[in-house]
Image (spheres, coloured by chain):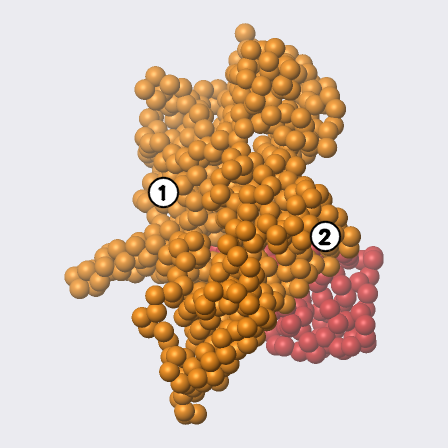
Chain colours: A red, B orange
């Protein structure tokens, strides 16, 4: 991700559990309307489902569970964002559930900060940086850490 | 992909030729006088040399030339093939492989050393001078003059043949004079840039026999016209017949239609033609792509069938049926294309057995049975490693040394058998030896020593042998170069599991051990039975299913302590998949049990509903789900949703484990 070395980040903004998350635009493959999810019994809770993305069986992750939020039923705005991330050298396709997909925007590196160590109920290693969007905070999640 | 990569093509071809060479050499060891084998080896060498030079593998060509020169003694019969010679020849073959595959990895002095050893092996006769002398009497007299009319196929240049190299090679045989025949050159409009329109008239004086001349054209002989005529007697030798060629440019240069000596040598034609019977080399990835497409088609067809079933239009129904039939045919054909006889794999192990037998000082005979059994290409490739480990184990641990064998009243030569056969939707590959058999007590002792087993636990033999697959488990007292580290069997197990197969071990003390790998026929599409558990749909491989029964109310309500069904007198444990999958919807009133088997073990899987059969295109699960071992993969249903495929081997294991636990508890209670 481009943030740490001082350049700006082009990001897709997701709304999730009342918070904003920024996904680097480069890893986003497509944004789908919700499709039927098949539960995988025995899988880790935040990737308990799989979906069919153009003939490929792709795990669907609910990041809410990684950030201590309670799952909510889908609404009209719910989307599935298909991203490709690098896991130990293997490009891996994952679907990410989002309450709403907002705009694609630039986040200036200067406007982001390290995640604070205190005063946060989230696991700090899952967060790469915290940025700003208007008056709200934006979480830039560390996808590699979340899925490894 | 458009233009073929010549170097790559050469590598592939060389790979096959080297295999042919190795097989011939190994066979020669048993029947040293078989001329057909010697010729086959020689042809392979010669082809490697020729195409190597053609495609710029100069090192390969040079080394192979040396090899060939030495081996020529064997072909001429002046030196018999011996064990030593075969051993060096095999080393030389390995060296060629290195030169072809990774030239930079070849050790500098290695080639020379091998060639020296080869020359040594064929003895003093390898000296070039006596060789020439030896060759001459065979052909009759000294130098002879030949008149050659050469017309290559028009597309030789496109195929990568350089006519100049052929002419140079002719020149190396003796003084020669030639003239180009230009009468076949078309007008400029008709000419293709890469066509070869020239012919040559050559007068060659050489001491070599006619066959040496023919050999120059060995690789192109099928696509060319070649006339070789002997001009006069050989007296004088140096004086060619001058009138022949300048005048020939008009009349004689035309393709010599009725010319009797037009060469179509049986032997040469044999090696090219026999194998090319309408076969085609296709890149493996294209086949994979094709299989993927067919998979998509099968899914789309399932969707169409589903739609047609709910339609009242009979035309649609009939088209859907046609498509279903065609798709099934296409699927079978495509899978058939990917099937390769396992013999190609078995062949590789002869060398392994040969080398191991020498290194370990044990006489070993390898017999292969069922080489024509076909398996998916990918599967064959993946099987190579596990089989290597199994064979090493069988020879190193299984077979006794000759003295012990003699003492036990057995033949000194140990027998390793590789057997492949079909059994239902599975292929069984067995490695069996006639050695000492497994020592159950020793395995138990070792397992207890490693803390894998509580002392005194009652186990079946099959369970005991499973410890052999435990990482780091080895009962060998010493670690040899071949085996004993306890790594091999672990690799075998893991590879077979990824192929969705299973391993059975059977042994008779003093008489040998059989390790059988049970493998699915294909990795791509299987017939499945679709079932419903709660709201989820799951596929069960049809090949694993023995029968489906209804769970009687009596069996259903019985306490947890007795999850057994009585299937015609046999007690079969059952697993409630609803519990396993933590399903929270209300169960269907009439639960069904699907009885599945894995090896000799059976287990019942309790489901809510049996939906029906389903063409299951297997999709692998993501790496993120690698920790879920209840499922071997997933498939996509007609409506586009995903269904998971149950991993039967794993579920059966689980069912059995539970049965053991319950038994143990009952024993304690008593």
Which residue is at the front of the view, B232 or B631? B232
Which residue is at the front of the view, A76 or B230? B230
Q: Position of residue B587 (x, y in %)?
A: 39, 37
Residue B279 in sight in this render: no
Image side of residue B303 versus residue B430, left or right: left
Compared to residue B246, the image places residue A135 above or below, namely above
**C-alpha span from label 2 to label 1:** 59 Å
Q: Earlier in the sequence, mark 2 or mark 1?
A: 2
Q: Position of residue B56 (x, y in %)?
A: 63, 67
Instruction: Kindly indicate whether the residues beneath marks 2 and 1 are on one polypeptide chain.
Output: yes
Q: Residue at x 55, y 68 (%)?
A: B236
Q: Residue at x 68, y 22 (%)?
A: B475
Q: Residues within 10 Å of mark 1 (few under 14, many from 20)?
A: many
Q: Are marks 2 and 1 in contact (CB under 8 Å)?
A: no
Label 1: which residue?
A: B529
Q: In the rendered image, which quarter contains the N terminus of chain A?
A: bottom right
């Amino acid at each position: 991700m481009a943030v740490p070395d001082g350049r700006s980040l082009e990001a897709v903004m997701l709304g999730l559990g009342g918070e904003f998350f920024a996904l680097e635009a480069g890893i986003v493959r497509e944004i789908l309307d919700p499709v039927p999810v098949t539960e995988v019994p025995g899988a880790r809770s935040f990737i308990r489902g799989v979906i069919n993305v153009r003939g490929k069986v792709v795990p669907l992750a609910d990041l809410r569970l990684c950030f201590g939020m309670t799952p909510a039923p889908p609404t009209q705005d719910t989307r599935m964002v298909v991203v490709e991330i690098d896991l130990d050298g293997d490009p891996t396709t994952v679907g990410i559930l989002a309450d709403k997909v907002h705009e694609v925007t630039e986040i200036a590196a200067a406007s982001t900060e390290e995640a604070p160590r205190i005063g946060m109920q989230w696991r700090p290693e899952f967060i790469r940086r915290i940025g700003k969007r208007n008056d709200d905070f934006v979480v830039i999640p560390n996808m590699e850490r979340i899925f490894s | 992909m458009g233009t073929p990569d010549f170097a790559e093509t050469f590598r592939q071809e060389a790979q096959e030729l080297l295999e042919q060479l190795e097989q011939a050499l190994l066979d020669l060891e048993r029947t040293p006088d078989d001329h057909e084998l010697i010729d086959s080896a020689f042809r392979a060498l010669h082809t490697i040399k020729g195409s190597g030079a053609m495609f710029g593998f100069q090192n390969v060509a040079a080394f192979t030339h040396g090899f060939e020169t030495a081996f020529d003694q064997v072909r001429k019969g002046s030196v018999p093939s011996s064990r030593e010679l075969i051993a060096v020849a095999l080393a030389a073959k390995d060296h060629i492989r290195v030169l072809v595959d990774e030239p930079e990895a070849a050790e500098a002095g290695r080639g020379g050393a091998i060639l020296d050893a080869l020359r040594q092996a064929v003895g003093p006769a390898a000296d070039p001078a006596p060789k020439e002398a030896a060759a001459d009497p065979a052909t009759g007299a000294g130098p002879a003059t030949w008149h050659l009319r050469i017309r290559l196929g028009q597309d030789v240049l496109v195929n990568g043949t350089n006519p100049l190299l052929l002419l140079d090679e002719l020149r190396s045989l003796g003084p020669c004079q030639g003239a180009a025949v230009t009468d076949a050159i078309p007008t400029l409009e008709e000419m293709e840039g890469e066509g070869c329109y020239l012919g040559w008239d050559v007068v060659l004086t050489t001491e070599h026999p006619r066959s040496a001349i023919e050999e120059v054209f060995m690789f192109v002989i099928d696509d060319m016209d070649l006339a070789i005529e002997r001009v006069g007697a050989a007296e004088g030798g140096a004086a060619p017949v001058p009138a022949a060629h300048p005048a020939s440019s008009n009349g004689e240069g035309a393709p010599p239609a009725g010319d009797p000596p037009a060469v179509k040598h049986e032997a040469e034609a044999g090696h090219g033609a026999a194998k090319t019977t309408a076969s085609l080399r296709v890149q493996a990835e294209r086949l994979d792509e094709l299989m993927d497409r067919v998979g998509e088609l099968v899914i789309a067809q399932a969707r169409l069938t589903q739609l047609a079933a709910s339609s009242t239009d009979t035309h649609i129904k009939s088209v859907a049926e046609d498509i279903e039939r065609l798709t099934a045919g296409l699927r079978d054909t495509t899978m058939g294309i990917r099937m390769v006889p396992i013999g190609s794999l078995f062949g590789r192990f002869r060398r392994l057995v040969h080398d191991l037998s020498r290194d370990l000082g044990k006489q070993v005979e390898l017999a292969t049975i069922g080489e024509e059994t076909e398996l998916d290409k990918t599967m064959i490739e993946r099987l190579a490693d596990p089989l290597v480990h199994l064979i090493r184990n069988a020879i190193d641990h299984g077979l006794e040394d000759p003295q012990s064998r003699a003492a036990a009243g057995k033949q000194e030569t140990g027998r390793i058998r590789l057997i492949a056969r079909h059994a239902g939707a599975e292929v069984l590959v067995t490695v069996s030896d006639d050695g000492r058999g497994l020592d159950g007590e020793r395995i138990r002792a070792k397992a207890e020593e490693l803390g894998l087993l509580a002392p005194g636990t009652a186990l079946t033999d099959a369970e005991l042998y499973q410890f052999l697959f435990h990482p780091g488990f080895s009962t060998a007292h010493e670690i040899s170069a071949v085996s004993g580290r306890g790594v091999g069997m672990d690799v075998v197990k893991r590879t077979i599991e990824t192929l969705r197969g299973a391993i059975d071990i059977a042994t008779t003390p003093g008489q040998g051990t059989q390790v059988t790998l049970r493998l699915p026929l294909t990795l791509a599409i299987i017939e499945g039975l679709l079932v419903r558990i709660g709201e989820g749909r799951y596929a069960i491989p049809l090949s694993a299913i023995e029968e489906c029964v209804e769970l009687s109310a009596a069996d259903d309500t019985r306490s947890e302590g007795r999850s057994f069904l009585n299937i015609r007198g046999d007690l079969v444990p059952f697993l409630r998949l609803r519990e396993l999958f933590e399903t929270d919807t209300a169960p269907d009133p009439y639960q069904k049990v699907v009885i599945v088997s894995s090896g000799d073990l059976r287990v019942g899987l309790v489901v809510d509903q049996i939906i029906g059969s389903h063409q299951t295109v297997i999709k692998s699960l993501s790496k993120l789900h690698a920790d879920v071992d209840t499922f071997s993969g997933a498939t996509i249903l007609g409506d586009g949703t995903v269904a998971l495929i149950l991993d039967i081997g794993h579920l059966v294991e689980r069912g059995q484990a539970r049965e053991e636990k319950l038994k143990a508890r009952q024993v304690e209670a008593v």
